[in-house]
Image: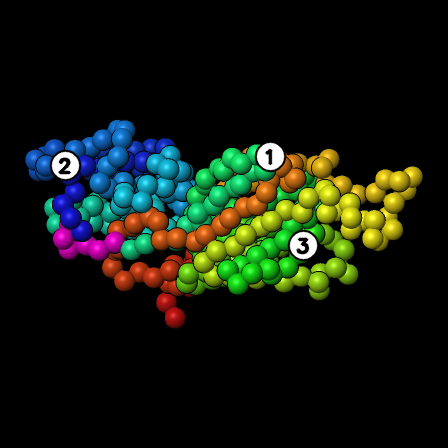
């Protein structure tokens, strides 16, 4: 790493975390380090004290700035992104500020999302863990799913979760999806209706490569399907999804509630956008074993 000229702190608001920040600030002043401590603006190093939620919240506040380096200290509970324990954090941070050339960084994969509306507007979002499309009150959403190789499947489901490898241990796992150790891939977990007779029609948890497209089925297409099936009464088809809005959630934050027919498509790519300080040889596999299986050594 290059010389660190400025740092900025973000914490979960716990007293212990805020007291730790004061100790670090005092040490920087005591040792006359040429490091500016910022309360706003872009810093060379962002130090997050909390759990994964604090890291995700901080990244969103900074608009997932790919030029910033993050150091995450675990002052929370479970932390897959926070690979530095609070007991060792003081020595590591001071050493990092004095000897940055002794440290390396690594990339964390995030979802790069474009929500494309039918009026031509495009909304950009990023996600550490997942994007979740959810029908109102468990109503079904009709969409087609594509991978980089083309059409994958047509789905009628109450929702879909698209997750990064990190996100595969969050909401996607609760929805029955597999855990991805690492790799340049995305998991999609389909939330199917309770009608088990339809479950074998879909790839429920397909893992795809670097990009995915969700294309929503229009009311006109739905109407033609219903006509073909004979679901017509007094000249009107029996089904339309225009009555129900769906929620678009990014890392558990609702970014829009919209009728599906008002969206043309959603494009999702996975990219190495964020930089984190590498601490020792701690791996994601070891972290998952400790957090999920509660096993520290094999």
Q: Is residue 20 left or right of residue 4?
A: right
Q: Is residue 123 left or right of residue 296?
A: right
Q: Earlier in the sequence, mark 1 or mark 2?
A: 2
Give the magenta-colored segment's residue range. 100-105
Quarter of the image with the C terminus in it: bottom left
Residue plotted at (79% across, 43% down): 239
Q: Which residue is mark 3?
A: 155
Q: Is residue 206 left or right of residue 104?
A: right
Which of 260 and 250 lies nearest the eye of the viewer? 260
Q: Position of residue 191 (x, y in %)?
A: 64, 52
Q: Which mark is residue 242?
A: none
Q: Which residue is mark 2?
A: 35
Above or below 280: residue 45 = above
Q: Earlier in the sequence, mark 1 or mark 3?
A: 3
Q: Secondary structure at mark 2?
A: loop
Label 1: few (<14), some (14–19) or many (≥20) C-alpha neighbours in 10 Å: some
Which of 238 and 63 lies nearest the eye of the viewer? 238
Q: In the figure, residue 97 lies in which quadrant?
A: top left
Label 3: few (<14), some (14–19) or many (≥20) C-alpha neighbours in 10 Å: many
Q: Position of residue 112 (x, y in %)?
A: 44, 47
Q: Which residue is mark 1?
A: 257
Q: Position of residue 38 (x, y in %)?
A: 23, 31
Q: Is residue 148 magenta?
A: no
Residue plotted at (32% across, 36% down): 10
């Amino acid at each position: 790493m290059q010389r660190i000229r400025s740092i900025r702190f973000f914490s979960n608001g716990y007293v212990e975390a805020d007291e730790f920040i004061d100790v670090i600030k005092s040490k920087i002043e005591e040792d006359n380090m040429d490091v500016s401590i910022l309360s706003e603006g872009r810093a060379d190093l962002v130090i997050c004290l909390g759990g994964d939620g604090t890291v995700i919240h901080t990244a969103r506040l900074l608009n997932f700035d790919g030029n910033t380096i993050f150091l995450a200290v675990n002052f929370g509970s479970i932390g897959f992104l926070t690979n530095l324990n609070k007991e060792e954090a003081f020595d590591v941070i001071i050493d990092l500020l004095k000897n940055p050339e002794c440290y390396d960084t690594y990339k964390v994969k995030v979802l790069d999302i474009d929500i494309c509306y039918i009026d031509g507007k495009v909304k950009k979002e990023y996600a550490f863990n997942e994007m979740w499309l959810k029908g109102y009150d468990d109503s079904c959403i009709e969409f087609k799913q594509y991978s980089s190789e083309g059409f994958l499947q047509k789905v009628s489901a109450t929702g879909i979760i698209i997750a990064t490898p990190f996100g595969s241990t969050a909401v996607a796992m609760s929805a029955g999806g597999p855990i991805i150790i690492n790799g340049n891939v995305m998991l999609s977990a389909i939330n199917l209706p309770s009608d088990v007779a339809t479950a074998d029609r879909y790839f429920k948890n397909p893992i795809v490569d670097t990009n995915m497209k969700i294309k929503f089925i229009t009311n006109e297409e739905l109407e033609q399907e219903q006509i073909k099936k004979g679901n017509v009464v007094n000249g009107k088809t029996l089904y339309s999804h225009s009555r129900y809005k769906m929620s678009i959630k990014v890392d558990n934050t609702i970014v829009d509630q919209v009728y599906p027919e008002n969206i043309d498509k959603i494009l999702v790519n996975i990219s190495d956008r964020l930089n984190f300080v590498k601490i020792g040889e701690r791996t994601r596999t070891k972290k998952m074993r400790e957090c999920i299986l509660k096993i520290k050594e094999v």
